[in-house]
Amino acid sequence: MNTQVVRCGLGMVLAGLVLLPTALADSNPVDDQVVVRLVPGADLGAFLARYPQVVEVRAAIASRDTYLLILQHDAGELEFVDMLNAGGDPDALWAEENYDTETPEGTGRNFFLNTTPNPTVYQNQSAWGQINMGGAHTRTTGAGIIVAVLDTGVDATHVALSGRVLAYGWNFIDDNADTDDAADFIDSDADGTVDEMYGHGTHVAGIVAAVAPMSQILPVKVLDSDGRSDNFRIALAMEYALDAGATVINMSLGSTYKSSAIEDAADRAYYLGVPVVGAAGNLNRERPEEYPAFLSHALSVAAVDANDVKSDFSNYNKDMVLSAPGEGIYSTIPGDLYAQWDGTSMSAPMAAGAAALLIAQHPEWPPTEERDDFVAIALYNAGVDINATNPGYQDMLGHRLDIAAAVGGPCTVGCKGDLNCDGFVDGFDIVPFVVALSNPADYADKYPGCDITSADCNIDGSVNGYDIDWFIETLQ
């Protein structure tokens, strides 16, 4: 999107002007900080006694025996980490430096413009049609699903979010229960611009709220109002979200350092059946990848324009799972206002909302890794192949999100064609498919709890012989 770039302070943000921060493209270690995971049952006190250069245990993920250690200045964080990872202490499972992380929009691009109090631009924007959102809501609205938004906080008083934001979120920046998306008037990243990411979390939450209109949002404040944080804090917040009952975790943030602490949390989410959705990044490159988006147990989301062409800022990668609109996306910002923003941060919550819709639609999916796999496969299989519109990025953008197809479209895993409700479209569905076609009443008796509309593979509103070809094609 071509826009006029204007540098301004916080007071001008709400007037709809654009901020363009300067930031480092790659993540950097936080001075004097090391993260260590000890083997189960290890004595923390005895471990610390061996290392006088450790001056403080700043924080802990107690359930994982993982600790954030503060070292004496210039004590050599990297050397300490290398020693532990080389087996220098039998109590250490792994160690790493604590790297910084931030919003993709904080790495050189940030379009926050056209502020308005008019909700129509938010409700009726073309992006919703592009991802086929409206067609999904007749089948599922995300009721009962909690989407954790790990971001700058959320304005829970916003009229479009009223009653949707849970009260038991946590602020990991200030270590309190205030999760409001508020400016702190501090240039914490020393880039000459104050509070350039103020409103980011509210904007992301508004996208989730639109895509999954009956879901609830768990606000987890992990980024300051300049959009900055660190990997240990992110891992700690992920663990909190899981303990608080999150069903989906959206992370419109990233680091080029692959943190073991974050990977541990993402692995736990996977085994609990909680999809972790990550923004791919805004630096128009394949490598280095940004995490958590490209962890093995996460859904990476790129950005495309209204014509399904890769946004000029979006990262790309052969491991990308999904793409979604990411240019000029209207959503909520603090103060009952709406504004446009560009970025993969806007694309990711569309996928998170879609995951919420699928999980709500399929209560029979167990809260295990199977559910996480079903969500990923269903969204990918139902998505649109956009290779034709992206000749320079073949198989680098995943499939463009098509939500209606995922929750009720052509036969996809965990969706259409799953006539025995086991989460798979396979040969075991043949018998129930025949029963559904020949005797719907008998199908209801033999497969209680299953939805006969799963046999409507061509989505024409009825279950009949025209669905057979679609079903056979899926099995092949």
Image (cartoon, rainbow, N blue to C red):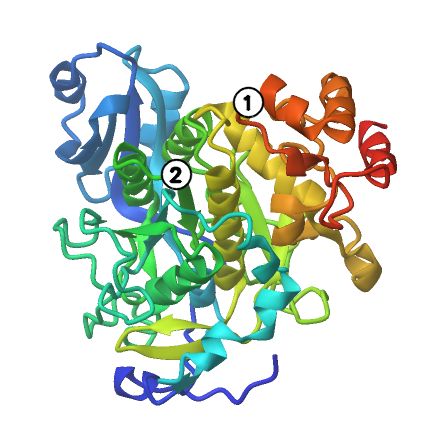
**Front position in the image: 124 or 432:** 432
Asked whether, in this view, residue 136 is left or right of residue 150, the answer is: right
Question: Dot 2: what SS?
Answer: loop
For marks 1 and 2 on the same chain, the one whose residue lies earlier in the sequence: 2
Side of 181 relative to 43 (left or right):
right
Between 416 and 64, the one lying in front of the other is 416
The residue sitting at 55% across, 42% down in the picture is: 299
Give the residue type at disc 1.
Pro
Identify the residue shown where x is 64% and y is 57%.
285
User: What quarter of the picture does the N terminus occupy?
Assistant: bottom right
**Residue 256 visible somewhere in the drawing:** no
Q: Which residue is mark 1?
A: 448
Which residue type carries mark 2?
Thr
Against 338, is 313 above or below?
above
> Is residue 331 shown above or below 40?
below
Relative side of 357 to 75, left or right: right
